[in-house]
Image: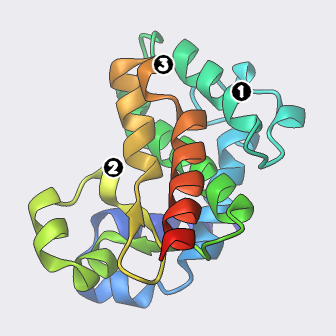
Amino acid sequence: MKLRSLLIIAAIAISGPDLAQAATDHNRALAEVSQMFYQDRGTLGRELLDPRKLDYSVESLKHVDAYLEAVRKNKDLQKSWNRTVLRAGAYVGEVIRRNDKNIRWQWVDHDGAQAVNPKYFGALGKSIATAAVLFDGKGGFAFPLAKVEKYLDNGSEDSVYFFAQVVMGSRSKADKKT
């Protein structure tokens, strides 16, 4: 299971259009990566994570914020940057997917997102922050991996807890107005 997920994620993150199109089960793959965040020994600072607090609730993102705050000061972070961003970002995205009552978010890879909005994703470019994004099926996107990367760069001003609340709250309010 772990190897399959890693291969799919590797294809998403670094492949050309042909391999990215072949990796169709992105929801399952990113759900598995989100579990690796707190289960796999390869996660930098895993000892800082309490699996009992990581129940995919929005409140669990406060624990992720605390983890990110601690790990951003770790001298080995640069060596584990992509793994940390991918695993923590997958967890953040899964919290949004599982808790948003108004939108059925789907994980898409960069190439899939670029097919929906070529100009925007072409300008963004392909990076770990855009390797996998949440798509609302109507042209809207959320970037949990990018938010984790911003937290690691900037600190608590880029809270993933607040990010999830805004993504889920602002969408539902906007939908009610229309």
Image point 19% across, 67% down: which residue?
121
Give the x, y percent position of residue 7: 49, 69
On the picture, is 177 further left or further right than 146? Answer: right
Which residue has dot 2 on it? 129
Query: SS at mark 2?
Result: helix
Residue 156, disc: 3
- Is tag 1's residue or tag 3's residue first in the polypeptide sequence? 1
Identified by mark 3, the residue type is: Ser
Q: Quadrant of residue 155?
A: top left
Lateral position of residue 45 relative to residue 12, left or right: right
Q: Amino acid at mark 1?
A: His
Residue 134 pos. (x, y %): 47, 66
Could you say which disc has been placed on residue 63 in the image?
1
Mark 2 vs 3, N-terminal side: 2
**Quarter residue 172 falls in:** bottom right
Element marked by disc 1: helix
Q: CA distance from mark 1 to mark 2?
A: 21 Å
Inspect the image, locate mark 2, and give the three-letter code of the amino acid beneath it: Ala
Q: Residues within 10 Å of mark 3 (few under 14, many from 20)?
A: some
Does the rendering let one see residue 2? no
Q: Residues within 10 Å of mark 1 (few under 14, many from 20)?
A: some
Residue 54 at x, y percent in the picture: 80, 39
In terms of depth relative to the viewer, which is nearer, 60 or 29? 60
The alpha-carbon separation of the residues under discs 1 and 3 comes to 12 Å
* Nearest the eye: 25 or 124: 124
